[in-house]
Image (cartoon, rainbow, N blue to C red):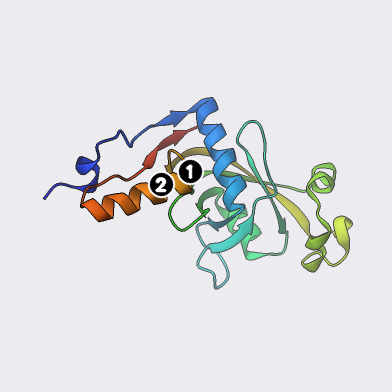
């Protein structure tokens, strides 16, 4: 039996690097907004995995997060800056995996730029809370799984393929190198 990729009538693999990779990262993180940020665990019960909300992805593809400087996440990154990020934007598309290096910072100007009033839930003293820190993740490599023509077209192709017993998947996937 052939694999699903060999049953495809369309090209479904496209590696992206530099500007196209950054564009895809911005697109998919804009849909998902939240990821699992994974570290090598040094403390805590999370085993190094926790959900985090992306505050911004800049023009270089750098991802920005806010974190408490007394958290296990902060401790883990202080011990080892290597991180992995897992995103899921929808049940059938908009998947992204990134691997990179995290840098911790207490840059008050950047914190104010990224501040959102809802964050007062975690930083009770507001944007000047002394516990607020930044995580800046510079992705180096990654992988994405998406569709080529949007969820409506992908859904139609899946339904037709199921009805006629032929793979008409609209997926696209590939390596990302920033």
Percent position of residue 50, x then y: 57, 63
Q: CA distance from mark 2 to mark 1?
A: 6 Å
- Residue at horizontal 78%, vertical 47%? 114
Q: Residues within 10 Å of mark 1 (few under 14, many from 20)?
A: few
Horizontal arrangement in the rendering, residue 3 relative to residue 24 (left or right): left
Q: Are marks 2 and 1 in contact (CB under 8 Å)?
A: yes
Judge whether residue 172 can be spotted in this image. yes
- The image shows residue 160, relative to residue 129, as above or below, that is above
- Residue at horizontal 81%, vertical 55%? 116
Secondary structure of residue under mark 2: helix
- Residue at horizontal 49%, vertical 45%? 98
Q: Residues within 10 Å of mark 2 (few under 14, many from 20)?
A: many
Q: Using the image as rendered, state which of residue 60 and residue 9 is in the foreground.
A: 9
Q: Residue furthest left?
A: 1
Q: Using the image as rendered, state which of residue 16 and residue 177 is in the foreground.
A: 16
- Residue at horizontal 54%, vertical 44%? 28
Q: Quadrant of residue 53?
A: bottom right
Horizontal arrangement in the rendering, residue 116 relative to residue 103 (left or right): right
Judge whether residue 96 can be spotted in this image. no
- Residue 121: mark: none
Horizontal arrangement in the rendering, residue 86 relative to residue 145 (left or right): right
Percent position of residue 48, x then y: 52, 63
- Where is mark 1, residue-wise? 150
Secondary structure of residue under mark 1: loop
- Where is mark 2, residue-wise? 154
């Amino acid at each position: 039996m052939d694999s699903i990729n060999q049953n495809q009538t369309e090209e479904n693999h496209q590696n992206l690097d530099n500007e196209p990779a950054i564009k895809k990262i911005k697109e998919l993180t804009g849909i998902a907004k939240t990821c699992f940020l994974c570290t090598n665990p040094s403390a805590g019960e999370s085993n190094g995995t926790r959900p985090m909300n992306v505050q911004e992805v800049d023009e270089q593809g750098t991802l920005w997060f806010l974190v408490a400087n007394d958290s296990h996440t902060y401790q883990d990154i202080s011990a080892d800056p290597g991180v992995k990020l897992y995103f899921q934007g929808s049940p059938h598309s908009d998947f992204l995996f990134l691997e990179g290096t995290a840098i911790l910072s207490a840059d008050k100007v950047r914190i104010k730029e990224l501040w959102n009033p809802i964050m007062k839930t975690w930083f009770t003293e507001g944007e000047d809370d002394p516990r607020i820190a930044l995580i800046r993740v510079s992705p180096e490599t990654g992988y994405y799984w998406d569709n080529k023509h949007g969820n409506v077209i992908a859904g139609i192709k899946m339904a037709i393929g199921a009805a006629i017993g032929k793979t008409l998947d609209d997926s696209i996937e590939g390596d990302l190198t920033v």
